[in-house]
Each structure stands twice: as C-alpha cells, then as structure tokens.
Image (cartoon, grey):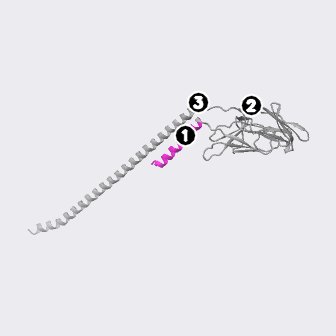
Amino acid sequence: VLHISDFTARQLGGDMWLLTALLLWADPTKAVITLQPPWVSVFQDEQVTLLCEGPQRPGDNSTRWFLNGTAIQTSTSKYSITAARVSESGEYRCQTGLSVPSDPVQLEIRRDWLLLQISSRVFTEGEPLTLRCHAWKNKLVYNVLFYQNGKAFQFSPRNSEFTIQKTNTSHNGVYHCSGMGRHHYTSEGVTVTVKGTSPTPVWFNILFYLSVGIIFLVNTVLCVTIHKELQRKKKWNLEVSLASDSGKKVTSHLQKDRYLEEEVNCLEQQEQPQEKAQQKNP
C-alpha cells in the first residue's frame, strides 16, 4: 500500500533535485579558492593553505582539487602545503558537489631574496590592491620603492606594504619593488589586470526569468499531483469503509435468518409428540 507521506517525500525529493539542477543551469555556482596567507606567490619552504568554498550535496562534503588539470589525491575542502617546493607551482582549481570548477589560482613558488606579493593577479574595478615587498625568511627590508611599468610611484622607509584602495583600469600593468637589506634587492615583475565593470548581459536576464518560470511550473505540477493523490487515497479509504459496513450488515442478516430457522425447527420438534398422542387417543 502506498502511503501518501511516502509519495509526497519522494515527489518533493525528486523535485528538489530538479529545482537545484535548474538553478545551477540558469546560474551555475562556481567554487571559490582563497589563500592563507592571501598571497599568490610565496618563497620556497614557506607554508600556504588553499581553501575551497562552494555548495555541497546533502551528506557529502568531498572536494576535488586539480593542479595544472591533474587531480590531486585529496578530498577535503582544505589543501595545505607545509613546505612549498618550486614543483608545486602552477594552476590550482577546486570543485564541490554542486558547483562548477573554480576560476584558476596561479600559485608561484620562488627562490629569490625579494618578492612582490599580491592577493590576486586579476581584479574587478573598485576592488583594493595590496602590494607587499617580502624578503626571504622575513628578513628586514627598508627604503622600499614600488614600481608600475618601470616607474616608481610609492616610497616607504620602513613599511613594506602599500594598498591602492580602489582600483581602476589605469592600475593595469607590471609591478615590482626594490628595497635594502644587507644589499639592495629588486623583485621580479608581477602582472596585474583590472577589469572594468559591465552591465548584466541580456541573455542572463532571459535565463533568469526562464528558470523562474520553469520552477513555478514544476511547483504547480507538484501541487496538482499531490492533490490528486490525496483525493484518490480519500476515495479509496471511503470505498473500503463502505464495503466494510456492507459486509457487517450482510453478516447480521445471515445470523438473524439462521436464528429464526433454528427457532422454527425447535417448535416443530415440540409439536410432533402432541400429534402422536392425539392419534393414539381418538
């Protein structure tokens, strides 16, 4: 016997997966990689941790990691490099159960004495850009100069970090830094790209409203189906109840008829001795 609760649970479960699939199709969710510390270039032997964030399937928190397109043998949302090696440089991606693969994060591991560190190589206009002139084994560096496309634009006698609070397309270019330690050192250049903001494309709006319409349709079909199933179950229970009452009435009539028959037989047996006595004494 199909219970309505079971039917409803199965229908809702199936439609929830359908709705999730539709939403992912209309607006696919990308996994996102964040770095701790937040720099895309580090020195050899330093520690760096990559964290993957994205929607997961119920009861399944596994995460897939890729380095230069090849799967890494780990399934947790955290991927730690305790002592970085140059061979671990490359393009990292991750993917969770209900996401599409993340945008690539290019991690660079170097052996230099001075390193210009940034949190990303690509920014959207308006985002902050932090530049850090980092020395090998955190050694002291002073008289720091920051350069864009070969031209110095910021000097700091002691502070090795500088932040551009709001970037725009004029901040595109190649950055490097120089500073004093035991000697004068200069870092390698790092390319920074700042993308301008653009309005939402028309096709995205079409997909969004189309997905909303499909979800509404699916919900309507689900409600109608459940309503019909409830009506069918109600009718079936009513028929079973009527059949049960009818059976009880038939049984009652049969018992009554049997009782009357036994009573008639009993009276006939009582009358037979009297008839015989009358026949002997005319």
- Tags 2 and 1 touching, CB below 8 Å: no
Q: Position of residue 58 (x, y in %)?
A: 60, 46
Q: Report whether residue 110 is seen.
A: no
Q: SS class of the residue under badge 1?
A: helix
Q: Position of residue 123 (x, y in %)?
A: 71, 35
- Is 271 situated left or right of 87 in this image? left
**Residue at far left of view:** 282
Which label's residue is closer to the chain start, 1 or 3? 1
Q: SS class of the residue under badge 2?
A: helix
Residue type beneath disc 3 = Trp
Which label's residue is closer to the chain start, 2 or 1? 1
Residue on which disc 1 sits? 19
The foreground one among 156 and 271 is 156
In 3D space, how far apart are the residues under numbered discs 2 and 3 (Cα atoms)?
A: 30 Å
Image position of 48 with respect to 274: above or below? above
Residue bounds of the magenta highlight: 1-25
Residue on which disc 2 sits? 170
Q: Report whether residue 24 is seen.
A: yes
Which label's residue is closer to the chain start, 2 or 3? 2
Query: Measuring 51% from the left and 47% from the top, which residue is drawn there?
Result: 9
Question: Are there few (<14), some (14-19), or many (20+) residues within 10 Å of tag 3?
Answer: few
In 3D space, how far apart are the residues under numbered discs 1 and 3 (Cα atoms)?
A: 20 Å
